């Protein structure tokens, strides 16, 4: 069985989350880690993990929320950090694709959340887009903090840097895209990967154009297993061991 280690199963995206969970169960996906991005979604994560036994949650302020968040939203995360089934801080990070002009504010927000992770010994889920150098330099300031690089892409040299810092690499539907070269480095990074969908985004091939769901972790797993020539059982063991190491679940 597999775990979708990064998804956004919020009511605004899905009419029937129980159906989404059942679809996943029918496709060998039996655990889900839902990531918050702002106050509203963090509150929803808390509610969902209480309602759904197979669901775990991370709380965080996404870099795209950098202009809207308040100190109160960070206090909310701190207050709930030891709640039942809250297993990490995420998704947090740097995104220079849409908002380069907020670099300083994004870095400040990321540092505040890494401070929380260090203080409470919690893993982090890192979003880094067009911001590799700053992300690496900041993570190096927090050698005690470990976690996951969500939606990892190339190059392999960067993968090695993250691995050296103790991070696992979240691989999603992007690996199946025809124009992606990520598959070429799978053999090298295989011992350090975990699987995710980032639902409702990044639907894998051949389902692109439809809404993503955690059930497609199986599609991603089948693709990877074929590329590196291992069994689905072995891939399940590698990824579940990594999940246990990072999130203790
Ligand atoms: Ni995400």
Image: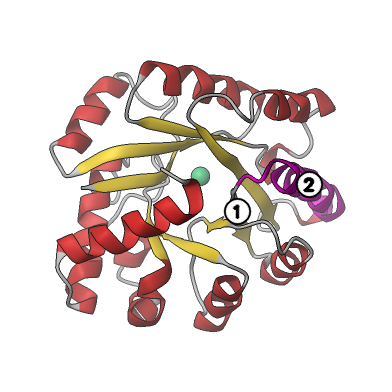
Residue 109 is a magenta residue: yes
Q: Which residue is mark 1?
A: 126
In this rendering, which labeled residue sits more in front, label 2 or label 1?
A: 2
Please, what secondary structure does the residue beneath circle 1 have?
strand
Rendered image quadrant of residue 230: bottom left
Residue 140 against residue 57 in the figure, above or below: below
Instruction: Tell me: 54 left or right of 80.
Output: left
The alpha-carbon separation of the residues under discs 2 and 1 comes to 14 Å
Residue found at x 56% / y 26%: 41
Tell me the crowding category of disc 2: few under 14, some 14 to 19, or many 20 or more residues within 10 angstroms, Cα based: some
Please, what secondary structure does the residue beneath circle 2 have?
helix
Residue 75 against residue 5 in the figure, above or below: above
Say if residue 207 shows up in the picture. no
Residue found at x 31% / y 38%: 31
Instruction: Tell me: 103 left or right of 237.
Output: right
Say if residue 28 shows up in the picture. yes
Q: Position of residue 16 (x, y in %)?
A: 29, 19
CB at disc 1 and ligand 1 closer than 8 Å: no
Judge by depth and name the residue closer to the eye, 164 or 36. Answer: 164
Rendered image quadrant of residue 135: bottom right
Judge by depth and name the residue closer to the eye, 202 or 168. Answer: 168
Residue 183 is a magenta residue: no
Q: Position of residue 91 (x, y in %)?
A: 59, 43
Instruction: Tell me: 111 left or right of 85.
Output: right
Q: Are marks 2 and 1 in contact (CB under 8 Å)?
A: no
Magenta highlight range: 101-122
Tell me the crowding category of disc 1: few under 14, some 14 to 19, or many 20 or more residues within 10 angstroms, Cα based: many
Q: Which residue is mark 2?
A: 115
Rendered image quadrant of residue 109: top right
Residue found at x 42% / y 39%: 33
Q: Position of residue 44 (x, y in %)?
A: 52, 20
Question: Mark 2 or 1 closer to N-term?
Answer: 2
């Amino acid at each position: 069985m597999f775990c979708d280690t990064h998804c956004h199963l919020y009511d605004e995206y899905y009419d029937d989350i129980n159906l989404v969970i059942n679809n996943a169960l029918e496709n060998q996906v039996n655990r889900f880690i839902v990531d918050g991005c702002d106050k509203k979604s963090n509150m929803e994560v808390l509610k969902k993990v209480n309602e759904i036994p197979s669901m775990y949650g991370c709380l965080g302020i996404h870099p795209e929320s950098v202009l809207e968040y308040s100190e109160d939203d960070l206090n909310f995360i701190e207050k709930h950090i030891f709640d039942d089934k809250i297993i990490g801080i995420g998704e947090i990070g740097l995104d220079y694709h849409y908002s380069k002009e907020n670099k300083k504010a994004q870095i400040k927000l990321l540092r505040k959340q890494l401070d929380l992770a260090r203080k409470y010994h919690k893993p982090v889920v890192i979003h880094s887009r067009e911001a590799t150098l700053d992300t690496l330099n900041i993570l190096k300031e927090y050698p005690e903090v470990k976690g996951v690089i969500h939606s990892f892409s190339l190059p392999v040299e960067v993968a090695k840097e993250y691995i050296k810092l103790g991070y696992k690499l979240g691989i999603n539907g992007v690996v199946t895209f025809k124009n992606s070269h990520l598959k070429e480095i799978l053999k090298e990074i295989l011992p350090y990967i975990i699987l995710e969908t980032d639902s409702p985004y990044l639907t894998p091939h051949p389902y692109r154009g439809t809404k993503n769901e955690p059930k497609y972790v199986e599609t991603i797993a089948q693709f990877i297993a074929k590329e590196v020539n291992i069994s689905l059982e072995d891939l399940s063991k590698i990824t579940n061991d990594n999940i246990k190491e990072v999130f203790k679940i």
